[in-house]
């Protein structure tokens, strides 16, 4: 039964499968329709639609394309029924898989395929690795496809660049339908891809093959402002004295932090003994006003 608005027309059903031969042309001959070249669907003549509606077929319509000379096969869906009678227009990548030229005769059969659960693809160039999210790009491109055939090399277009992907494996069969399916996708290494060589780990300045032979003298302590100065007259002048160089060999001691500090409070330290920087002699405690006074007027000698 086929309906147009409120009018219903009955067509006699038949068990005869759809099998016709057509002359094959690329979409460039029809006018270069980009939506056909970007997907996996073909354009058939109106007479094919008339025959299909009279048959008891399963929807969505899926077809098997066969090159009778070589036996090469592929599968596709249908986009429109507007082609000239006796002709079909298919994407150019599909013509390459079938190994046919413009005007060659192909056979088209209506088929029923299983729903895809898994597919594995192999990029034909390492340029595919430049895509940031390849799975998202592939998922968006496969929306224009109806089915996949194992062994086909499909073409997807991303950023005005064509990427060829070989269908290495499909489950549960060699030809599957990808319309409204939940399919896992995997990628094989692209053709020409070479694994990067592992660079040996470089040992740092402080690592040694025999750690027992390392001494404290081999590791230089941090010395702030340990450079040399330059004079405008060109003469060299050292920036270190013997006493300063000896004192800088010892790492400066740091003060003990206040573990009882609380946010929002200020602590004033009084009469705190300064931290010694490695001197063995005990520093004298601070004494306020312990200096000697001086007078401007000298006393007369008696």
Image: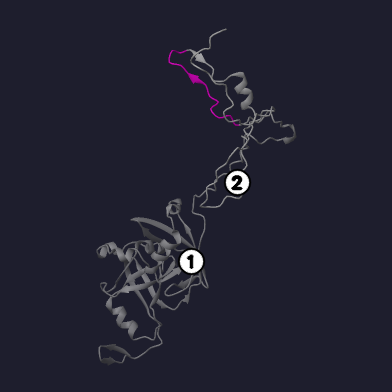
Residue carrying label 1 = 150
Residue drawn at x 57%, y 24% as measured from the top left = 291
Give residue 258's mark. Answer: 2
| Numbered disc 2: secondary structure | loop
Please say whether residue 103 is visible from this viewpoint. no
Along the line of sight, the residue nearer the viewer: 2 or 137 = 137
Residue 247 appears at what percent x and percent y?
A: 63, 25
Residue 184 appears at what percent x and percent y?
A: 50, 68
Magenta stretch, main secondary structure, is loop
Q: Quadrant of residue 21?
A: bottom left
Is 233 part of what is drawn in magenta? Answer: yes
Quadrant of the image containing the C terminus = top right
Residue 120 appears at what percent x and percent y?
A: 50, 63
Residue drawn at x 33%, y 63% as measured from the top left = 37
- 256 horizontally vs 102: left or right: right
Compared to residue 43, the image places residue 5 above or below, namely: below
Q: Earlier in the sequence, mark 2 or mark 1?
A: 1
Residues under labels 2 and 1: Cα distance? 72 Å
Range of the magenta residues? 222-234
Please say whether residue 300 is visible from this viewpoint. yes
Along the line of sight, the residue nearer the viewer: 46 or 249 = 249
Along the line of sight, the residue nearer the viewer: 32 or 201 = 201
Compared to residue 233, the image places residue 81 above or below, namely: below
Q: Closer to the observer: label 2 or label 1? A: 2
* Residue found at the far right of this picture: 212
Is 54 part of what is drawn in magenta? Answer: no
- Label 1 Cα neighbours within 10 Å, binned few <14 / some 14-19 / many ≥20: many
Residue 204 appears at what percent x and percent y?
A: 62, 36
Quadrant of the image containing the N terminus = bottom left
Residue drawn at x 33%, y 84% as measured from the top left = 53
Along the line of sight, the residue nearer the viewer: 145 or 141 = 141
Compared to residue 238, the image places residue 54 above or below, namely: below
């Amino acid at each position: 039964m086929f309906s147009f608005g409120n009018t219903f027309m009955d067509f006699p059903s038949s068990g005869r499968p759809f099998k016709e031969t057509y002359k094959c042309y690329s979409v460039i001959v029809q006018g270069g329709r980009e939506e056909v070249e970007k997907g996996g669907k073909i354009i058939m003549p109106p007479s094919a639609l008339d025959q299909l509606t009279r048959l008891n077929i399963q929807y969505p319509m899926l077809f098997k394309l066969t090159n009778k000379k070589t036996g090469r096969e592929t599968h596709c869906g249908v986009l429109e029924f507007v082609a000239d009678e006796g002709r079909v227009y298919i994407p150019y990548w599909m013509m390459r898989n079938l190994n046919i030229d413009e005007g060659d005769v192909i056979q088209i059969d209506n088929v029923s395929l299983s729903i895809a659960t898994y597919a594995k693809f192999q990029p034909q160039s390492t340029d595919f690795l430049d895509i940031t999210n390849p799975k998202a790009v592939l998922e968006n491109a496969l929306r224009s496809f109806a089915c996949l055939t194992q062994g086909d090399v499909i073409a997807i277009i991303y950023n005005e660049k064509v990427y060829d992907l070989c269908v290495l494996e499909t489950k549960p069969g060699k030809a599957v339908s990808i319309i409204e399916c939940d399919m896992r996708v995997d990628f094989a290494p692209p053709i020409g891809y070479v694994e990067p060589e592992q660079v040996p780990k470089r040992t740092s300045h402080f690592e040694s093959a025999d750690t027992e032979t390392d001494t404290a003298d081999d590791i230089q302590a941090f010395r702030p402002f340990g450079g040399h100065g330059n004079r405008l007259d060109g003469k060299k002048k050292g920036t270190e004295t013997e006493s300063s160089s000896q004192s800088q060999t010892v790492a400066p001691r740091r003060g003990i932090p206040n573990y009882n500090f609380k946010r929002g409070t200020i602590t004033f330290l009084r009469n705190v003994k300064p931290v010694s920087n490695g001197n063995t002699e005990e520093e004298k405690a601070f004494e306020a006003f312990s200096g000697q006074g001086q007078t401007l007027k000298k006393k007369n000698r008696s």
